[in-house]
Image: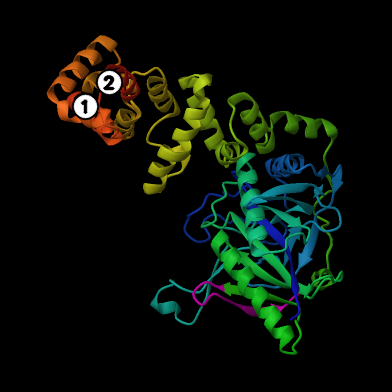
């Protein structure tokens, strides 16, 4: 049986977080009624001229620096010519021969494996509008509408090399890229609103073959689950087609989530089909080194560097550091918790953020930025666990109270209000233990005959008598001493 190798490259359209469009002053805010955010430039009225948005260029520079790419001193905007109803000008302003960023790479992790995915380029371009085929009312039956609110929205198209060999790797790459563009603040990453969309170029070839197979491009995948399902289906379809004696034709395809299948939309165009030429209305984009260095100075600490520092400074495992740097907000929350709890409690903080807080956020379908408990509150709670004021079981009750308090109470206030302080005083515990042993001679005899369960039962009796407030570790130590 012939073995096949899968080859995947991904083109990602990242909507840049600017207040206005790339060549006009129209708003980029999501959710407006159709065509309310489209001005004369966006709808291509005769005589209007585009004006480049400096903030969009700065986003591209930030990305180029973050991936170790080359930020071009000079790049050119080109016209990409094609006809579609939601493209008012009949061409899209994009970049072709001279993009704003070349090269770079993005490290990914899938399971225990690590891999560097090389990037070909990243270029600036404008988005098209949107065709509407449903929800237009009874009088529009059989017709389509055009919403030009998205026309001119700034995009950074990021093109990878065909370095991925499975859907798992492709999803790991998409997740890593999604996390990075949010981390450096150039995209909100909202896939439901179309802010982050992937096109997957998929081909197969016999194992050991150097030449690439014919690729098919799966367009506009806006969820990681759909990305994996679409690639898995496409790979199996291509292999089955070839093994049945057929051939693969280069094409653009769409993924249907309902059926889980891809279907051809049109034959795939090559660059010459778009008749690229430099846009005569836009000057070359010149980026001097001073501007690049200014942007570099404003970049946050990048994920890889943050992970290394957390491992060195907080004593975290590589796994913990990777989880806690999944987003900039999460990393900042964790470090603020450590500041409130004390550096010596950094590992306990990691456990609470990754387990207890994460479970609460998942249950309530919240992001870390919507946490019901602040980092300062959580750090204060962890400090009380560490100094023995409360037990871990009591801490979870306090945590629930903190989550329900609306950031209005501290752990200390809740502990004092509910009388939850842990009893660690030896004299008080010894008196309790003496009374307990006197009242339970049978359990004592069982323990001394070698039944360890009897000891656990005695500890449980002390905890019950103190309503769970006794320090369980100290109870065990004193009880064993008493029992000889």
- Magenta-colored stretch includes residue 262: yes
Q: Secondary structure at mark 2?
A: helix
Find the distance from the CA under tag 2 to the CA under tag 1.
8 Å
The residue at the point 28 percent across, 12 percent down is 425
Does residue 18 appear in this view? no
Q: Is residue 188 left or right of residue 283?
A: left
Circles 2 and 1: CB atoms closer than 8 Å:
yes
The residue at the point 40 percent across, 22 percent down is 380
Check the image and report above or below for 193 versus 307: below
If you read the primary sequence from the N terminus, does the residue marked by circle 2 or circle 1 appear first? 1
x and y percent of residue 212 in the render? Answer: 83, 71
Rendered image: mark on residue 219: none
Residue 285: name its quadrant: top right
The residue carrying pointer 1 sits among few (fewer than 14), some (14 to 19) or many (20 or more) residues within 10 Å by Cα, namely some
x and y percent of residue 359 in the render? Answer: 40, 44
Which residue occupies the foreground of this view, 390 or 46? 390
Q: Residue under label 2, please give it.
A: 483
Q: Residue under label 1, please give it.
A: 444
- Location of the C terminus (image quadrant): top left
Q: Residue furthest front?
A: 449
Magenta-highlighted residues: 256-268
Which residue occupies the foreground of this view, 14 or 84? 14
- Magenta-colored stretch includes residue 253: no
């Amino acid at each position: 049986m012939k073995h096949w190798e899968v080859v995947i490259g991904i083109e990602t359209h990242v909507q840049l977080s600017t207040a206005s469009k790339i060549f006009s002053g129209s708003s980029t805010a999501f959710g407006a009624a159709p065509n309310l955010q489209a001005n004369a430039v966006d709808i291509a009225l005769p005589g209007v001229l585009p004006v480049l948005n400096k903030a969009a260029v700065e986003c591209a520079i930030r990305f180029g620096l973050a991936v170790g790419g080359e930020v071009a001193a000079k790049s050119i905007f080109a016209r990409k010519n094609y006809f579609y109803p939601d493209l008012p000008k009949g061409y899209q302003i994009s970049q072709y021969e001279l993009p704003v960023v070349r090269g770079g790479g993005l490290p990914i992790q899938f399971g225990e494996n690590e891999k560097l995915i090389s990037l070909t380029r990243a270029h600036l371009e404008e988005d098209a509008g949107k065709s509407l085929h449903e929800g237009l009312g009874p009088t529009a039956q059989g017709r389509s509408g055009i919403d030009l609110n998205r026309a001119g929205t700034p995009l950074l198209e990021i093109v990878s090399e065909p370095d991925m060999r499975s859907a798992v790797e492709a999803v790991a790459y998409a997740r890593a890229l999604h996390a990075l563009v949010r981390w450096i603040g150039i995209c909100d990453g909202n896939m439901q609103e179309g802010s982050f969309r992937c096109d997957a170029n998929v081909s197969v070839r016999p194992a050991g073959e150097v030449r690439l197979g014919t690729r098919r491009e799966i367009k506009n995948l806006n969820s990681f689950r759909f990305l994996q399902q679409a690639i898995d289906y496409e790979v199996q379809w291509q292999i089955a087609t070839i093994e049945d004696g057929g051939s693969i034709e280069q094409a653009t395809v769409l993924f249907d989530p309902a059926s889980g299948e891809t279907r051809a939309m049109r034959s795939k165009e090559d660059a010459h089909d778009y008749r690229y030429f430099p846009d005569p209305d836009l000057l070359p984009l010149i980026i001097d080194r001073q501007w690049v260095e200014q942007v570099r100075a404003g970049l946050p600490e990048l994920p890889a560097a943050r992970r290394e520092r957390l491992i060195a400074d907080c004593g975290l495992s590589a796994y913990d550091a990777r989880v806690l740097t999944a987003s900039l907000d999460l990393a900042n929350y964790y470090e603020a918790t450590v500041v409130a709890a004390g550096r010596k409690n950094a590992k306990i903080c990691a456990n609470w953020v990754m387990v207890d807080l994460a479970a609460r956020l998942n249950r309530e379908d919240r992001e870390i930025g919507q946490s019901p408990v602040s980092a300062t509150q959580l750090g204060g709670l962890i400090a009380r666990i560490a100094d023995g004021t409360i037990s871990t079981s009591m801490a979870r009750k306090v945590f629930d109270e903190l989550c329900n308090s609306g950031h209005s109470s501290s752990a200390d206030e809740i502990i004092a209000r509910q009388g939850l302080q842990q009893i660690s005083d030896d004299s008080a515990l010894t008196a309790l233990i003496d009374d307990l042993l006197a009242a339970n001679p049978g359990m004592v005899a069982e323990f001394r005959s070698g039944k360890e369960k009897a000891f656990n039962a005695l500890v449980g009796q002390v905890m019950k008598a103190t309503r769970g407030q006794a320090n369980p570790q100290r109870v065990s130590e004193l009880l064993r001493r008493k029992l000889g």
